Amino acid sequence: MMITVKHPGKTCAKKTAVDDLSLSLNRGLATGFPGPNGARTSTSTVRARKHAIREVVVLEAAGRLIGVVEGLEAAIQLALAEGPRGVVCDLSGVLEDAEPLAVEVLATAGRHVRDWPGTPVAVACPDPQVREALDAHPLGTHLIVTESLFSAVSAVLATPTQAMERLQLAPHPTAPRASRDFVTRTLLDWRLGRVIPFASRVVSELVSSSSINAGTDIDLSVAWDHGALRLAVRDHGPVLPDQQTSALGLHGRCLSVVAGLSRTFGVMPTADGGKVVWAVLDAPRPQLLTRGIRSERATPTPNSPIFTDGRGSTEMPFCAGSSRQGA
């Protein structure tokens, strides 16, 4: 249980609008509590659930569109941080409402697909006006827009599966070296040798920053999709209030390296209170070699092999294990 409200009251112009109300909200997000019109304002909610087919996260919204778009934005970020097969925003419970401002905010979700390659985001919306407005928006073109939840999930599952490898690290001084070795091995395996010098520097700075600032276990993921290489470092340290405006807590040389070598970079909160700091690099490959990259989903398994660096140091404390699994 996330939020519990007991026995609040509200009056409007000497009239009682809410009296002795008890409310409990379970896991998920909720926005839109009673506003200036008291009980006449309906509550809008966003709830997340994981679809039974291949790790597709479905975000269910209900109420007015203007009341759920901000909650959807936050829920999309939390979902993407978990590395799903895809994210579907189900608006079948949203009232027909094509307010320009609401559609504009909803369309900006397309930037996550633009900046976070390989993980599709779909919108299932029965309202044809909203669908048309999303298709016409520059960022909305990055979204999969369909009429029903079934077609949205089907479209997500029909997209190519990105190549991905994972490594678990402990906050040890040698973690940056382990991350560089892992990225080098992965990119050589994918025949992306040209990007190794740049990716190694970026991942080293991200891991070093996480080790120093968060001091928690680190989950490193490396993903490639259509010429874009994504390096993501997840830790369990909270996103500080000033990190959005101070370039994610990166400073000095670290910020210069990441900003200078990346196409884009950013930070996402996680459901457990931690964060994912990520960077995307351009990593094109010759057309004849594109098929050489394996399309994988790297989910941790009990039998995941242990990562070993060039010296065979599997027992070093910085290296907790790696995951390498086919789709």
Image (cartoon, rainbow, N blue to C red):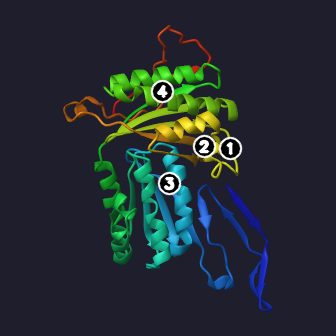
The answer to which of marks 4 and 2 sits earlier in the sequence is 4
Q: List the residue tagged with mark 4.
A: 200
Q: Which residue is mark 2?
A: 275
> Of the residues shown, which amino acid type is indicated by label 1?
Pro
**CA distance for labels 3 and 1:** 23 Å
Q: Are marks 3 and 4 in contact (CB under 8 Å)?
A: no
Q: Earlier in the sequence, mark 2 or mark 1?
A: 1
Q: Few, some or many C-alpha atoms within 10 Å of disc 2 (few <14, some 14-19, many ≥20)?
A: many
> Which quadrant holds residue 227?
top left
What residue do we see at 31% from left, 26% from top? 191
Q: Earlier in the sequence, mark 2 or mark 3?
A: 3
- Kindly indicate whether the residue at mark 2 contacts the one at mark 4 (C-beta within 8 angstroms): no
Cα separation, mark 3 vs mark 4, equals: 36 Å
Element assignment for label 3? strand
Which residue was labeled with disc 1?
238
Q: Quadrant of the C terminus?
A: top left
Dots 2, 1 in contact, CB < 8 A: yes
- In what element is the residue under mark 4? helix
- CA gap between label 1 and label 4 equals 25 Å
Q: Amino acid at mark 3?
A: Arg
Residue 324, given in percent of the width and then of the height, sits at: 41, 26
In this rendering, would 173 be left or right of 192? Answer: right
**Which residue position is annotated with label 3?**
49
User: Contact (CB < 8 A) between labels 1 and 4?
Assistant: no
